Amino acid sequence: MKQQIAVLGAGPMGLAAAYQLACDGHRPVLFEADDRVGGMAAAFDFSGLWIERYYHFHCLSDRDFLDLLAELGLAEKMRWVETKMGYWHRGKVQSWGDPLALLRFEGLGLIAKFRYGLHALACTRRTDWRKLDGLEATRWIRDWVGAEAFEILWRKLFDYKFYDYAETLSAAWIWSRIRRIGLSRAGLFRERLGYLEGGSETLLQALKAEIERKGGVVRLKTPATQVRVEGGAVKGVEAGGAFHPFGKVISTVPLPYVAQLMPGLPEDILAKFRAVRNIAVVCVIAKLKKRVTGNFWLNTNDPDMDIPGLVEYSNLRPLPRAVVYAPFYMPGAHPKFAEPDAAFTDKVRRYLKKINPALADDDFIDIRASRYRFAQPVCGPNFLETLPPFALPVKGLWVADTSYYYPEDRGISESTAFGRKMARRAAAA
């Protein structure tokens, strides 16, 4: 039986949910507050270059993403590149990411190097994360690699991404990040990452086109303001100044919005959504006449740089000019998040010129800053136990965001797979 089902949020998860519903013969109606689809994967016009506001890359292990590309006829647009990692430490760019680079790394003792390498290998080979679920990440890593390697290689990565939350994270969540990169290797000394021709926009627009071709509706610039719940059941959605009756709703908006959006939920459920903590991001993107380094990813350990690293995206995806992302993570309530864009762009100019002294002011073609208030859920030990089930105890209502595929980190592959899963459950209920 054909059903009309509302989907809230047109990021990768919401698009995938609506796409699955349309493929299964239903009529999804997708509501999105922005003027474009994509959420954190959405693109913008960067001085003539259409590119994501926030960087994305793909790993060899992203099977759900690759299967979706094949289904949409986009598999031939996937490209794999051997990339390099670096580490800015002791005032120089050092090679990173393979056993030889670890052995040559300056500023770390031999025992610390051995323990670090052993931990990375163990993470790649581990397949069951549940024994790590109840462990706190910094303690777990310190126990493995020792105090020296933790302070030099890990401390600032935690501190400059999570601030006061740095010592409240799940070891399982950190493990999944290490393992994902570890599995995206073509050999012990060869890292291979992927990009989609045209960027994420290629996938996003293909999903939107298929939704509409199969009879679904995508309503941009139409933010949902309330999901009406009465008598333990969904009645519809208030959006764009009007009420739209629906018997089923799938929400993929960030969890911190849920309590405001769905005030009719039971109080114990609302309390769990309110308790979810998130990290914000101010992501600076710079376009330059020359590249900064030869690395795709550059970790940083510098007392004068308040970022965990840089992503030189043009060292993955060939572009007419060098493009670098510099993410500043912080809690949304931190005073730094309220600083003007210029405070962040000025820092990035200074950081890039410090890393590559050959860069001059006129090498910067353009530089912008984008902000996202709920960029990263803070996943503590036993994180899933703190969340309500995504099939809520309300008839016709399913709610999730990137938090729900813990211990995996935010990713297009994981988001689209979970969105399709929710759609199937909703349609079958």
Image (cartoon, rainbow, N blue to C red):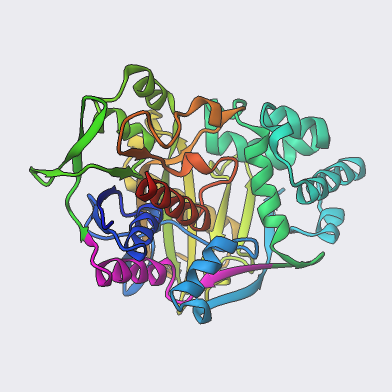
The residue drawn where x is 43% and y is 37% is: 390
Outermost residue toward the bottom in this view: 76
Q: Residue 414, image x and y in percent?
A: 52, 53
Q: Which quadrant, please, contains the C terminus? A: top left
Residue 68 position in % (x across, y down)? 49, 67
- When the figure is inspected, residue 379 is found, relative to residue 358, above or below; the finding is above
Does residue 318 appear in the picture of this structure? no
Q: Nearer the viewer, residue 59 or 143?
A: 59
Q: How many numbered marks have been drawn onto this rendered protein structure? A: 0
Q: Is residue 220 left or right of residue 134?
A: left
- Residue 255 position by quadrant: top left
Q: In the image, is residue 268 part of the stretch drawn in magenta?
A: no
**Residue 19, picture quadrant:** bottom left
**Residue closer to the observer: 56 or 328:** 56
Residue 261, position as x, y percentages in the image: 24, 33
Q: Residue at x 37, y 38 (%)?
A: 399
Q: Which residues are magenta?
A: 192-217
Is-magenta flag for residue 203? Answer: yes
Q: Nearer the viewer, residue 236 or 376?
A: 236
Give the answer, above or below, for where 322 lies relative to 59.
below
